[in-house]
Amino acid sequence: MYLQLLTYGGFPLLIIVVGLTLHGAWLAWRKFKSCKGENKYLYVAVLATILTIMMYSMAGSIFAARRKIGFLFWALCGIAATLPERGKGVGGYK
């Protein structure tokens, strides 16, 4: 996938996609460390899946599997970015 992104869009596209991937993993890691409830296991699963997708992308392309599992990466990044931490409501309000 990384070579495909590099040939289709050059370094800017590669940097954007890798940056989004790493940002999603970082958000999942931060929320995993700060959460003490049942959502902690969700963040472990999200982080593990994002890291697995990054490793898989060295030999395959998640974008080639659009119909089956291509949405999985973006759904997991959305979960990592939007779920509030325990004890906080949406947007940090109680």
Image (cartoon, rainbow, N blue to C red):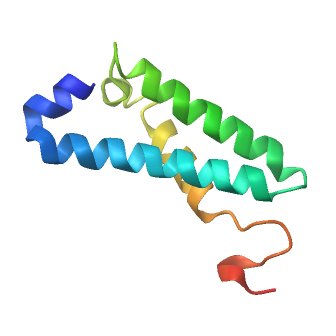
Q: Is residue 47 above or below residue 39?
A: above
Quadrant hosting residue 58: top left
Residue 14 location in percent, x, y?
22, 40
Q: Is residue 8 above or below residue 42?
A: above
| Residue located 25% across and 27% down the image | 2
Q: Which quadrant of the figure contains the C terminus?
A: bottom right
Q: Is residue 69 above or below residue 20?
A: above
Give the side of residue 93 with respect to residue 2, left or right: right
Residue 3 can be seen in this image: yes
Residue 74 location in percent, x, y?
46, 46
As drawn, which residue projects farthest toward the bottom?
A: 93
Quadrant hosting residue 31: bottom right
Quadrant hosting residue 86: bottom right
Residue 81 location in percent, x, y?
57, 60
As drawn, which residue projects farthest toward the right?
A: 37
Give the side of residue 26 with respect to residue 5, left or right: right
| Residue located 54% across and 35% down the image | 50
Give the side of residue 48 with respect to residue 5, left or right: right
State the count of labels.
0
Of residues 61 and 31, the one drawn nearer to the viewer in this rendering: 31
Q: Which quadrant of the figure contains the N terminus?
A: top left
Give the side of residue 84 with respect to residue 18, left or right: right
Of residues 74 and 23, the one drawn nearer to the viewer in this rendering: 23
Residue 68 can be seen in this image: no
| Residue located 27% across and 49% down the image | 16
| Residue located 81% across and 48% down the image | 40
Q: Is residue 51 above or below residue 20?
A: above
